[in-house]
């Protein structure tokens, strides 16, 4: 079903995100028939382009990042005709009138700020002074949304000068991933899980987002951020919220976001011995973190593991172990809900020690499975084995680029539909920084130096100890 007709302006339309994710994603929606035939995508950036040169740049990008679908030459040509280019001066007057002239009345107007946050204020202001944005327009903003509570508040205030909260779509692309939404369906559309979803039955929860890539060409950004700001404050905390939140009374933007906010506010401060930071070492083929960021004394973490607790009735005493890092042994993101042992087992010895685990796999092989214990088939007596009860509904997505794109295209369509459920509200982002700020300040004050770990490993030894000390262990990264 096509969404309403729209004009989408992408500020930063020549940037990396636009080329890798936003435009290939839109192309896929176009091919799927969801993007109306005459919808327009207007790239606005500094470089001098005309429509033709911009289209050929994006054609190349879609061929590179758009997966198998970019082989559809006819479809690609039709899509490229939807693209326009305007050179605008974010801090001056140049180009704004041309942009205004391109915009049509009577269609949804959406503005995607895929630029440095330092420009948000200038762009928002000019959109208004030139009469381009109005009360019905939508604004999409990318992470990083600030680098601490203070800067996030300032950004929220800047945007609030020109847009209302119900016009602002703060993207966290993890919320657009298929299984993340499935997680909500599994929790809230089944009678089976909710009765067990609490401290009486859940022993602990693990959230792992492991990557094999290093910091690549983003060294200068990354070295000022680190894994905590880059991944935990947004993606991992969003996952944690969806796992831990109370059932919202309906699947509606504010109802969902109110519940997520309560989780963030109930997160407890963490002692320093429950946080492990790491930095990857060089391997034969790849450079070390410090080499990658060209900062031989860097103390920024490319890995972090921590043990969080939530102070409310449902989760009292249940640890949430979070870890994420670059250059680990596999690209694998999953959430594991590990249930408690049975109070009493009728089976003896080793046969008694089995646990149910609900695994939500974000990537690769998106899916959900429940580890259950059954009798090993055969005549060998009562021997128990764990088998997965596979609940994979989504077809496994293709290559790595594809599943990221998938999240983006879904979210952009939600913007056009005016559905904010999968976007972060301003107060949520601020609350998340309010939790991470003291942790970051803590290690900065201690002059904490990250532990090194081997490229291709599961992270520093100390991160394994974080769980061993509690008599638990991480699930393998595979
Ligand atoms: C981004 C981070 O938000 O998410 C990157 O800035 C990270 O550092 C990326 O690599 C991971 O996304 P995905 O979808 O590939 O897991």
Image (cartoon, rainbow, N blue to C red):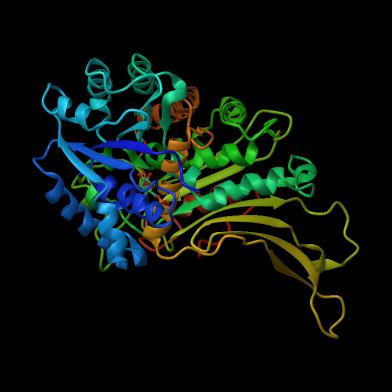
The image quarter containing residue 246 is top right
Q: Return the residue found at the far bottom.
A: 379
Foreground: 393 or 366? 393
- Image spot of residue 199 (x, y percent): 74, 39
Quick check: can you spot residue 91? yes
Foreground: 395 or 417? 417
Picture residue at 28% right of the left edge, 46% below the top: 18
- Marks counted in the figure total 0
The image quarter containing residue 256 is top right
Foreground: 39 or 380? 39
Quick check: can you spot residue 469? no
Residue 5 as seen in the image, left or right of residue 41 = right
- Image spot of residue 191 (x, y percent): 79, 47
Residue 185 as seen in the image, left or right of residue 140 = right
- Image spot of residue 7 (x, y percent): 32, 36
Picture residue at 54% right of the left edge, 28% below the top: 269
Picture residue at 22% right of the left edge, 33% below the top: 102
- Image spot of residue 252 (x, y percent): 60, 32
Q: Return the residue found at the far left.
A: 48
Picture residue at 79% right of the left edge, 41% below the top: 200
Vertical arrangement, residue 345 with respect to residue 22, above or below: below
Foreground: 412 or 38? 38
């Amino acid at each position: 079903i096509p969404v309403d007709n729209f004009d989408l302006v992408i500020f930063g339309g020549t940037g990396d995100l636009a080329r890798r994710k936003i435009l290939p994603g839109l192309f896929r929606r176009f091919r799927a028939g969801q993007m109306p035939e005459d919808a327009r995508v207007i790239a606005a950036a500094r470089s001098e382009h005309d429509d033709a040169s911009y289209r050929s740049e994006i054609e190349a990008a879609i061929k590179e990042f758009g997966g198998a679908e970019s082989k559809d030459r006819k479809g690609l040509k039709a899509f490229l005709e939807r693209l326009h280019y305007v050179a605008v001066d974010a801090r001056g007057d140049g180009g704004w009138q041309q942009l205004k002239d391109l915009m049509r009345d009577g269609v949804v107007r959406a503005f995607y700020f895929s630029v440095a946050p330092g420009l948000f204020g200038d762009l928002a202001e000019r959109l208004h002074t030139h009469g381009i944005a109005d009360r019905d327009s939508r604004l999409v903003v990318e992470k990083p949304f600030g680098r601490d509570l203070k800067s996030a508040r300032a950004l929220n205030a800047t945007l609030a000068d020109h847009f209302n909260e119900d016009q602002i779509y703060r993207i966290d692309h993890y919320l657009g991933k298929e299984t993340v939404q499935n997680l909500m369906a599994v929790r809230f559309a089944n009678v089976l899980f909710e009765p067990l979803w609490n401290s009486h039955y859940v022993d602990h929860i693990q959230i792992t987002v492991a990557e094999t890539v290093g910091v690549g060409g983003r060294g200068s950004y990354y070295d000022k951020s680190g894994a905590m700001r880059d991944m935990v404050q947004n993606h991992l905390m969003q996952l944690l919220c969806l796992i831990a939140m109370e059932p919202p009374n309906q699947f509606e933007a504010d109802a969902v976001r109110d519940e997520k906010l309560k989780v963030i506010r109930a997160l407890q401060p963490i002692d320093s011995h429950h946080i492990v930071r790491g930095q990857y070492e060089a391997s034969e083929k790849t450079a070390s973190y410090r080499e990658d960021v060209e900062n031989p004394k860097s103390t920024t973490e490319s890995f972090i593991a921590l043990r969080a607790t939530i102070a409310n009735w449902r989760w009292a005493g249940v640890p949430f172990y979070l870890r994420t890092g670059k250059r680990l042994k596999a690209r694998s993101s999953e959430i594991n809900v590990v249930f408690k042992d049975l109070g009493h087992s009728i089976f003896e010895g080793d046969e008694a020690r089995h646990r149910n685990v609900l695994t939500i796999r974000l990537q690769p092989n998106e899916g959900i499975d429940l580890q259950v214990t059954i009798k090993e088939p055969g005549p060998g007596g009562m021997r128990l084995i764990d088998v997965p009860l596979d609940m994979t509904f989504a077809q496994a997505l293709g290559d790595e680029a594809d599943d990221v794109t998938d999240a983006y295209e879904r979210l952009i369509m939600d913007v056009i539909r005016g559905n904010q459920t999968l976007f972060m509200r301003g107060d949520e982002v601020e609350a998340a920084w309010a939790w991470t700020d003291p942790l970051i300040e803590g290690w900065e004050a201690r002059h904490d130096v990250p532990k090194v770990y081997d490229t291709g490993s599961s992270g520093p030894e100390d991160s394994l100890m974080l769980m061993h000390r509690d008599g638990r262990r991480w699930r393998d990264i595979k």
